[in-house]
Image (cartoon, coloured by chain):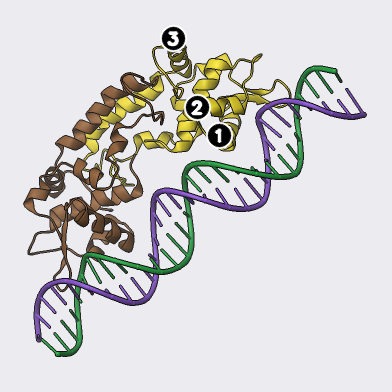
Chain colours: A yellow, B brown, C purple, D green
Amino acid sequence: MFSKSTGYALRATLYIAQKGTEDHKIGIDDISKAIGSPRSFTAKILQLLTKNNKIIHSTTGPHGGFYMTEKAKNLPVRAILQAMGEDGLLDRCILGLAECSEKRPCPMHSKYKIIKTQLIGLFETETINQLASDIQSGKVFMKLK
Amino acid sequence: MFSKSTGYALRATLYIAQKGTEDHKIGIDDISKAIGSPRSFTAKILQLLTKNNKIIHSTTGPHGGFYMTEKAKNLPVRAILQAMGEDGLLDRCILGLAECSEKRPCPMHSKYKIIKTQLIGLFETETINQLASDIQSGKVFMKLK
DNA sequence: ATAATAAAAGACAATTTTATCTTTTATTAT
DNA sequence: ATAATAAAAGATAAAATTGTCTTTTATTAT
């Protein structure tokens, strides 16, 4: 569905939301090991998330690393997609047509719309916080065995 | 959602299903112009669809071109995804986790599953024929204005 | 002030996807 | 048989995505 980059962004953000606080920041080594992603590449992605939409914060130097504010943790998961520039993917024509709309629908449009609406709703409703605490509760998982 | 290649495959197949019969085959120039895709690249994709899963047929020489058998037209749209090797995409973890399953679900798993099931159902239920005749009826569109 | 730490930034490389162009092969009509 | 037609096949290239490595900058603790 999404690119590898966005997958890393989603997982890294959820990990930071779980483990990182302003006085216990979390390093890129820890993050990339935990989510099984290439270290430097993940660093670049986190730079995007810190710069563009301020979803995560970071500081350099000793005891530096990444963390999230409580406010940011309450953002919908969709905010991560937006920061990664893949939010539009959710609303795109499934046949890949540029001109697909209510007025000029493709043959899949009306039936896919019902699904698409739920998909957007899901990413809009679920917050980063919610998913992170679901992981904490131990009922769902995000780490490699 | 899908790659550009798969988008071309879907659109080309629907176009062939509409316009192509065994005694009126349809050429790659016509197809690529109609669906707005790069000619030679589309040709490669159609070669896949003819070879791998026999979704479309082709002949060389004068009055040659692409067409579909009635049997093939009754295949679900999903068959095109399978031929393109992107069928698995429908069932993949939305966070990009390799190990995401009922036993070990990611935090999005249970809610996404409901949507995923509908998505697979849609591609499984809709036939190539159905979509092609919907286009013919003039209520839905696939060509560039 | 200085050394140590950790992210930011930059340069570069590998891989995958997408696209173009040319040559070959198969088929048809003359 | 020959010429014309159209897909198949092959070679190559451009672009985008993913990945690695090095240097720089900011911060902290000594």
Residue shown at 10%/64% (left/top)?
B24
Residue ID for mark 2: A35
Please give the label number shown on residue A137. 3
Vertical order, A107 against A49 (above or below): below
Local crowd size for mark 2, using a 10 Å CA cut-off: few (<14), some (14–19), many (≥20): many
* Tags 3 and 2 both on a single chain: yes
Task: Name the amino acid, label 3.
Answer: Ser
| Residue B5, image x, y percentages | 32, 50
Q: Are marks 1 and 2 in contact (CB under 8 Å)?
A: yes
What is the number of callouts on the image?
3
Q: Mark 3 and mark 2: span between their CA atoms?
A: 18 Å
User: Residue reaching furthest top?
Assistant: A137
Q: Quadrant of residue B39?
A: bottom left
Q: Can residue A96 be seen in this snapshot?
A: yes
Question: Mark 1 belongs to which subunit?
Answer: A
Q: Earlier in the sequence, mark 1 or mark 3?
A: 1
| Neighbours of disc 3 within 10 Å: few (<14), some (14-19), many (20+) | few
Image position of D11 with respect to A125: above or below: below
User: How far from the left and from the top, in percent, is residue A31?
Assistant: 56, 26
Identify the secondary structure beneath mark 1: helix
Residue A42: assigned label: 1
Residue placed at 69% from the left, 23% from the top? A64
Give amino acid for label 2: Ile
Residue A63: % across, % down: 70, 20
Q: In the rendered structure, which disc, 3 or 2, sits on the residue that comes first in sequence?
A: 2
Which residue lies at the image location 26% right of the left edge and 32% below the top edge?
Answer: A113
Circle 2 — which element? helix
Would residue A35 appear left or right of A113 to someone viewing this image?
Answer: right
- Compared with residue A23, is residue D25 higher up or lower down, i.e. above or below? below
Left or right of residue A47, residue A13 in this image: left
